[in-house]
Image (cartoon, rainbow, N blue to C red):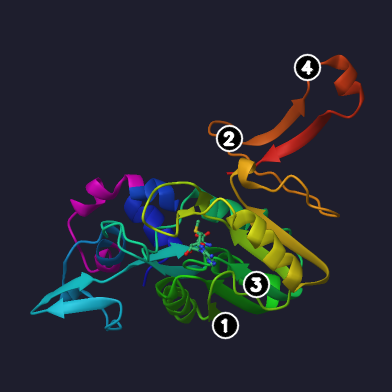
Amino acid sequence: MITRRGLAAWAGSDRIPIVRARLAQLQALPVTRASAELALFVAGVEVERGLLPAIDDELVEVVGDRARARVSVLPIGDALIVCDRADAAEHAELVCWPDDSSFHLGSAIPPGRRGSWLDLGCGSAVAPLLRPALAERIVVSDLNPRAVRFAELGAKLSNVRLETIVGDLAVSPADLITCNAPIPGDHVAAIWRATDEGFVTRLFEAAQSALLPDGLIVVHSALDAIPRVLPGESVIVYRGFRDFVGPYVGHCHNLAHEDHAMMFGWEITP
Ligand SMILES: C[S@@+](CC[C@H](N)C(=O)[O-])C[C@H]1O[C@@H](n2cnc3c(N)ncnc32)[C@H](O)[C@@H]1O
């Protein structure tokens, strides 16, 4: 059974980006019955079949007495997500390991239960699986059919009900619409990471067309990809701070600006 606590005890951290950076060390650890599933699905090493419980063929291939993971299975919150192995070759339909942006989107959504939630460009469905209590009905959609299948597998492992759609910015009406957008102009193969220059504009159009009255759209995006005019909208700008966590004062050094409310407190969270 893979859990966040188990991951923290084995890897020294339950933060997926940190665990990823330690993979070479984790691959060298001895494999015991207690660590076998983590070694298989997180470190990606071959494991003796006898050390593992029964596992779905879609997740693991068994040759003789050795098992090899077809995918990675990672604990996030109380859930498990499914994505491609960390050593998978780059290709258009690669479903990447979640990175900081995946967790930033998940933690940026304000609390409060809504009727319906649409996660656009769901990948492995990190945000919905991290915070399933945010809506009665959760729909996830992605252009990449492999991502949608992986979202379904993660939902099944996590006992969370997700409805899925495959399509180009495919929408269904929702009270909450979220997206951790790929970055325009990055020249890499995986559509998980890169998209065309017009993507974020099309994303806002699609999301606005599907948003139910009094709804909320939360997008994680490169700042310069956000359209300048978003009539009637407020924008949450998310920024990563590397070294400092806790209450913090942001202010403009120009005193006249400071006097006009450009001084405020905020809380930097990990
Ligand atoms: C940065 S990844 C985010 C994945 C996941 N939501 C997360 O936070 O880990 C962007 C996702 O958008 C999807 N995507 C790219 N272009 C799309 C499009 N035109 N329509 C729907 N999804 C798209 C990619 O396949 C990928 O899963």
Badge 3 marks a residue whose secondary structure is strand
What's the mark number on residue 161? 1
Query: What is the distance, in whole Å, between disc 4 and disc 3 at their CAs?
Result: 41 Å
Residue at 84% in and 28% down:
262
Tag 3: amino acid: Leu
Badge 4 marks a residue whose secondary structure is loop
Query: What is the distance, in whole Å, between disc 1 and disc 2 at their CAs?
Result: 34 Å
Badge 2 marks a residue whose secondary structure is loop
Residue at 36% in and 63% down:
94
Q: Can you identify the residue that label 4 sits on?
A: 253
Tag 4: amino acid: His
What's the mark number on residue 118? 3
Residue extent of the magenta highlight: 21-38
Q: Nearer the viewer, residue 133 or 87?
A: 87
Query: What is the distance, in whole Å, between disc 3 and disc 2 at their CAs?
Result: 28 Å
Does residue 199 appear left or right of residue 8 in this picture? right
Residue at 42% in and 74% down:
150
* N-term-proximal mark, 1 vs 2: 1
Locate residue 171, reporting x and y percent: 64, 75
* N-term-proximal mark, 4 vs 1: 1
Q: Nearer the viewer, residue 54 or 214?
A: 214
What's the mark number on residue 39? none
Q: Quadrant of residue 68?
A: bottom left
Whether 36 is among the magenta residues is yes
Image marks 4 and 1: residues in contact by CB distance under 8 Å: no
* N-term-proximal mark, 1 vs 3: 3
Tag 1: amino acid: Arg
Tag 2: amino acid: Phe
What's the mark number on residue 241? 2
**Mark nearer the viewer, 4 or 2:** 4
Q: Quadrant of residue 209?
A: bottom right
